[in-house]
Amino acid sequence: MSMHEKNSVHRNEEIKKLLHQANRLMISTSVDGMSNATLKNFVQDGNDLIFWAFNTEPAAEQIRLNAQVQALTVPTANSPSLHIEGRCYPLKDEKEITQARQALLDAGLAPAELLNDPFLIKNKVIGYYRLKPLRIRKKEPLPEPAVQEQIEFPQNRPSELAVGLSDVLNRLKLWIRAVRAPFFTATIVPILLGAVIAWGDLFHAGMRAAWDWGLFWLILIGGILAHAGTNLANDYFDHTSNNDEMNQNFSPFNGGSRVIQAGLLKPYKVLWAAILSFVLTIAIGLYLNKTVSGAYFGKSLLIYLGFLGIALGAFYTWDPFRLGYRGLGEFSIALGFGPIMVLGTHFVLTQPLTHNNLALWHWQKPLLASIPIAILIMLVVWINQFQDLQADAQVGKNTWVVRLATFEHDQIWYEKPFLIYVIFNVIGFGFIFMLAIIGFFKPEFSTPFAFIALLPAPLTFRAIKWGQEWLKRWNDPQADRQKLPYELLRVNVSTIGVHFLTGLLMSLAYWLGSTF
């Protein structure tokens, strides 16, 4: 072995010894030009470093989108720091997670009351991360030594193709999260319902061939873009009011997408994405209006419905109107994702029958069908506001949940807003029952097959029971009110599921009513 090789081996051993002596890292992460630094205790697993983090903290959020990190060991007395360049990955295998938790606990580098908390484990609040070094360099005081003391780990370096593909997929996932795509069911349901009723009208008029799939898909795309713009604008303006920053009870169902708060997207990008979404929605709407009236700005009902829908979405949290802050948010959601979408869809797709003549338009059936859908989507927002209540109240976002709740010292009483939740659930399914009865005697207004849309009712009653049990636990003076908001999540999920299932069954009911 040459002298150079001997010195290299010696330097490598010295660096490994220094790393073995350390147990604390300053980790720097970055996404979209926004950086974050955090201190973490770690244990070694071979050459890899293992640490834990809350999955919602900015460093963990950024790691899941950009694995490239920089780290610096916190030096002990008389020992230099080590600069580590590497890639960091969340552990997903349950066996690895268990081993990582135990290693951190055994080393005394993590609080046992947190890492062993059944609630935190069940809800995956805490994550474990593996830092695979690409290069470890000894940080010396200036001036830098002539020979750079470092270890390379080429086996940990992924291919450029893999990194590029991962970056593209992560960017796609980021924007899917930003627009809150899973909630697009709120748009799909009313548009599908309006389209099915329109198809039935064409079918009964002997004009099945006039059905236009191209227009249907264009309406759906326009509706989704309007929904995306609403969500993005909501995120931006809830950021400017500090609402989302103050919200400590956020979840996948409330508190926004958190892309700004997690340092994943710059606020101005969220705002411009909202504006772009609305611009594209308007462009599609004008094209549809030309199809209906013969001109982009031709006189038709669609131009008014479209304007109202855009206004409700944009001004839900947009300055200076902020409808959601003035107690008009729930009504805006019900109107926009109920009658406006159902009637707008039906109006466009039945143009072969009406030719833009309102006197020939059979609007009664789609309007009546839209009412329970409007109530159920409003309830999704309503129950989600329970977890948001404290942050909403602090920034003056006077939702009806905030208005109805009772505040006494440090206690919040949710009985009144929950009672309204129960009442509107009963009204929603009661209206469906009424539609089914009407369908027997006035098929031009409804369909008797609407009875099948009552099938999700048991899930609603189960959600109400869960909510009542939650209220009892919340009112207990010994309640852990930091964890309790998350125990309401099954009610949030059930409410979303009831809206979606009921909407699909309503669409099926009207299709059956048209076919048989």
Image (cartoon, rainbow, N blue to C red):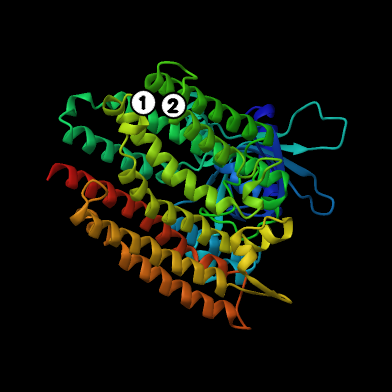
Place of residue 366 in the rendered image (x, y in percent of width and height, measured from the top left): 33, 44
Contact, CB < 8 Å: mark 1 with mark 2? yes
- Mark 2 crowdedness (10 Å alpha carbons): few <14, some 14-19, many ≥20: some
Kind of element beneath mark 2: loop
Q: Amino acid at mark 1?
A: Asn
In what element is the residue under mark 1? loop
- Residue at 46% of width from left, 20% of height from top? 298
Please rate how many residues cluster around mark 1, counting C-alpha atoms within 10 Å: few if below 14, some from 14 to 19, many from 20.
many
Nearer to me, 395 or 10: 395
Amino acid at dot 2:
Ser
Residue under label 2: 300
In the rendering, at what x and y percent does residue 508 appear?
23, 47
**Does 514 sit above or below residue 450?**
above
Mark 1 lies on residue: 356
Residue shown at the point (61%, 68%) measured from the top left: 404
| Quarter of the N terminus within the rendering | top right
Nearer to us in this view, 471 or 289: 289
Q: Nearer the viewer, residue 492 or 368?
A: 368
The answer to whether residue 259 is visible is no
Q: Quadrant of residue 70?
A: top right
Nearer to us in this view, 165 or 48: 165
Q: Position of residue 155 (x, y in %)?
A: 51, 34
Name the quadrant of the C terminus: top left
Q: Residue at x 26, y 28 (%)?
A: 353
Q: Residue furthest left?
A: 516
Q: Does 290 sit left or right of 106 as displayed?
A: left
Number of numbered labels in the structure image: 2
